[in-house]
Amino acid sequence: MAAVVATKYNSDLKIQYERLLKNGKAKMRALCAPMLKLVHICFGVLKHQKPYQQQVFI
């Protein structure tokens, strides 16, 4: 459920999710990629003890 909420409110994960859907991936498959990215974000925050900063896409 965290990945579902994150794809709505986190712009990085939302962009990735929408891109995968646009490329023809199934909804569940498209949701797994942001879910894994969310796990990596959580691990990075815990490991480095720094707050999460969203990426800036130009």
Image: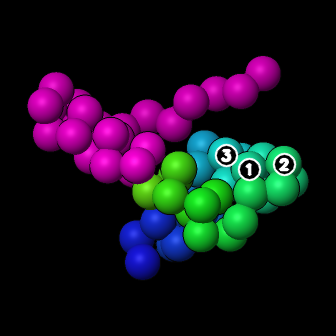
Residue sitting at x 15%, y 39%: 46
SS class, disc 3: helix
Dot 3 and dot 1 residues touching (CB under 8 Å)? yes
Asked if residue 56 is positioned above or below residue 16 in the image, the reply reads: above
The 10 Å Cα crowd at callout 2, few under 14, some 14 to 19, many 20 or more, is few
| Amino acid type shown at disc 1 | Leu
Q: Which of 45 and 51 is in front in this view?
A: 45
Q: Which residue is drawn at 40% across and 70% down?
A: 2
Q: Which residue is drawn at 74% across and 57% down?
A: 25
How far separated are the C-alphas under marks 3 and 2? 11 Å
| Mark sitting on residue 23 | 2
Name the kind of residue labelled 3 in the image. Answer: Gln
- Tell whether label 2 touches label 1 (CB within 8 Å): yes
Q: Position of residue 12 (x, y in %)?
A: 60, 44
Q: Is residue 22 left or right of residue 5?
A: right
Asked if residue 22 is positioned above or below residue 57 in the image, the reply reads below
User: CB atoms at circles 3 and 2 under 8 Å apart?
Assistant: no
What percent of the width, then of the height, locates residue 53?
A: 44, 34
| Residue at (41, 49) in percent of width and height | 36
Tag nearer the camera, 3 or 2: 2
Q: How far apart are marks 1 and 2 (CA)?
A: 5 Å
Instruction: Report which residue position mark 3 lands on.
Output: 16
Magenta stretch encompasses residue 46: yes
Identify the disc placed on residue 20: 1
| Secondary element at image label 1 | helix
Determine whether, in the image, residue 3 is placed left or right of residue 8: left
Looking at the picture, the colour scheme in use is rainbow
Compute the Cα span from label 3 to label 1.
6 Å
